[in-house]
Amino acid sequence: MKHLKYIFLACAGLLMTSCMNGDWDSVDTHYTRGNSAITETHVISIAQLKSNYATQLAQPYGMAEITDDIQIKGYVMANDNGGNVFSQISLQDATGAIVIAISDNGIAGYLPVGTEILVYLKGLYIGNYGYQTQIGTPYSSERNQESVSRMSKIRWYQHFNYTNHTITPTIPLFDQSRITDANYLNENAGRVMTIKNVAFQQAGIKDYANRADVVNNNACERALVGLNENNIVVRTSVYADFAADKLPTGQVDITGLFTRYNNKWQIIIRQVSDVKAAN
């Protein structure tokens, strides 16, 4: 009987261990992307969202929690395909665009460009990082500078749902004559656009990015011929898939995510194929 008792206890222990391992695995590795419970109820435009929080967005690092039961709907225009747009997407509707900051990898795998999504905003934050407006959660830097930064992926999965629509995006042109226009900057920062007929200052010499030239946050900035680098640069992460490629020679058309840091445009190329010889 004692032997049977020990055998029973050993088997029970193995069963409990197996169950516990199964539970831990399910917690750590299985997530559902998107929240099917989110349906269209109180959808507002991206322009209206920014207008609602104009007071906070007038500050370089202003932010506010979104407490209203509201949603936005738009198409994904930039994701982490290419490794240069990192942990964020650009969402665009007919009125404008906004960056959503997400602490996740492989976003392009479940939110390819052209995917329409519905985002439930209550409980998230809207704010600026150097006047670049984004949606996420609060973050405090080592210098105690608070700003809106990346939300956890689990939180993100609970705040968006897919629609049944996808598009082949039409990408607007960047108006070079308005590089220093404050209104143009406010209206278009966060949008994917194309700047045409430009050339890199160090074409064929410099890489897109390398550690010797890092400006900050593991990224390099490259100037364009004839355009003041205090007003506009091409910004590339050293982790981008194409970081080691030489800057292309000749006149080119550059498509990218046009963000801002204070009053300077930063063009973030999504993938190297976004840079083409000018027509």
Image: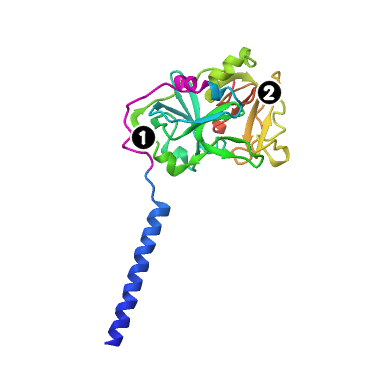
Q: Where is residue 278 in the image (x, y as percent from the top left)?
A: 59, 20
Q: What element carries label 1?
A: strand
Viewer-side residue, 199 vs 149: 149
Q: Is residue 145 left or right of residue 160?
A: right
Question: Marks 2 and 1, how far apart in space?
Answer: 39 Å
Q: In the rendering, which numbered label is found on residue 161?
A: 1
Quadrant where the image shows the N terminus: bottom left
Viewer-side residue, 188 vs 40: 40
What range is drawn magenta here? 33-54
- Asked if one can make out residue 75 in the rendered structure from this viewpoint, the answer is yes
Quadrant for residue 217, please give it: top right
The type of residue carrying mark 1 is Asn
Q: Residue furthest top?
A: 177
Ranked by sequence position, the earlier of labels 2 and 1 is: 1
Q: In the rendering, which numbered label is found on residue 224?
A: 2
Asked whether residue 232 is drawn in magenta, I would say no
- Residue found 31% across the figure and 31% down from its top: 39
- Residue found 42% across the figure and 21% down from its top: 45
Q: Residues within 10 Å of mark 1 (few under 14, many from 20)?
A: many
Q: Is residue 65 left or right of residue 69?
A: right
The correct choice, above or below, for 267 with respect to 176 in the image is: below
The secondary structure making up most of the magenta span is: loop
